[in-house]
Image (cartoon, helix red, strand yellow):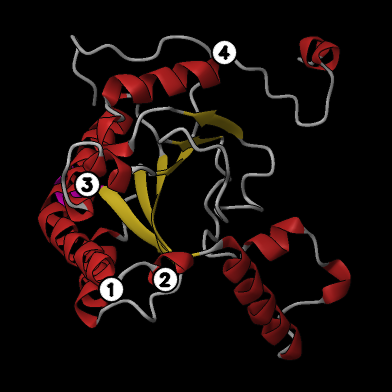
Amino acid sequence: MSSANEATPSRGTLPTHVAIIMDGNGRWAQTRGLRREEGHRHGVENVKRILEAARDIDLRYLTLYAFSVENWKRPRTEVDALMRLLDSFLKAQRDDLIEKQVRLRVVGRLDGLPGRVVKRIEETVAATRDFSRWTLSLALNYGSRTEILDAIRNYAKAVQTGEEDPASLDWSALQRYLYTGEMPDPDLVIRTSGEHRVSNFLLLQSAYAEYFFSEKYWPDFDKDAFHAAIDAYRNRQRRFGLTSAQLQSSP
């Protein structure tokens, strides 16, 4: 789906799944003398550009950390503004996702989100459910520790009903109970704004992911920056516990 005259990464193996911690909206606004809400608005606009960049390289899975369980602690006015932006983004993007056949998934707890947002999410998820080539996942009301607790609770219920045998528990069995379900683990996790921490994001799923930290605030993280992160990933060697020699000798 890329344009012939757009620069795209050109080396190594492309990732299948990229996850992004979209950080720095508020600081982007503050450096410009704007309200934090303006930073979030520009951040939402940038999501649309990065969606296009992901389609340029035919990225199968893109997961965006949009709102964490800890974000509820922010000032009420900011939280309300974020929910309004989320609602307007879902409303504006629904037809585009359907037209481009992009499946929408949400990872996180829907309970706690405003009713109008939940309704918009459910409608869009249902309308795009059958698409399989590209998947956009929004991490909303998400925290990895909360996800793990929910997975354990649901697995325990399955054991009680006889659906699961704890003696045969392995990673693939537990993985099915995570919010991400059958999605592949992320190959690359990007964080913007110059911070170097993972912020309770996909802790289990990113066990073997590559990380890329950008100094750019999220509203400034454009297509070129995204492609630079992909290039950095493609120049790395993923060993998964093996040595370089073992990888070179494998068929």
Magenta residues, as a range? Answer: 97-101
Pointer 3 with pointer 4, Cβ within 8 A: no
Q: With respect to residue 245, does 2 lie above or below?
A: below
Percent of width and height locating residue 156: 72, 82
User: CA–CA distance between discs 2 and 4?
Assistant: 39 Å
Q: Residue at x 68, y 38 (%)?
A: 208
Pointer 2 with pointer 1, Cβ within 8 A: no
Instruction: Please name the amino acid that badge 2 sits on.
Output: Lys
Instruction: Please name the amino acid that badge 1 sits on.
Output: Arg
Mark closer to the chain start, 3 or 1: 3
Pointer 4 with pointer 1, Cβ within 8 A: no
Q: Element type at marker 2?
A: helix
Q: Residue at x 45, y 22 (%)?
A: 230
Q: Which disc number belongs to residue 246?
A: none
Between tags 4 and 1, which lies in front? 1
Q: Which disc number belongs to residue 235?
A: 4
Q: Which residue is mark 1?
A: 76
Q: Which disc number belongs to residue 73?
A: 2
Q: Is residue 98 magenta?
A: yes
Instruction: Please name the amino acid that badge 4 sits on.
Output: Asn
* Structural crowding at the residue carrying mark 2, measured as other residues with C-alpha within 10 Å and reported as few (<14), some (14–19) or many (≥20): few
Q: Element type at marker 4?
A: loop
Q: Which disc number belongs to residue 39?
A: 3
Percent of width and height locating residue 90: 19, 60
Percent of width and height locating residue 222: 27, 27
Mark closer to the chain start, 4 or 1: 1
| Prevailing SS of the magenta stretch | helix
Mark closer to the chain start, 3 or 4: 3
User: CA–CA distance between discs 4 and 1?
Assistant: 43 Å
Q: With respect to residue 13, does 151 lie above or below?
A: below
User: CA–CA distance between discs 2 and 1?
Assistant: 8 Å
Mark closer to the chain start, 3 or 2: 3
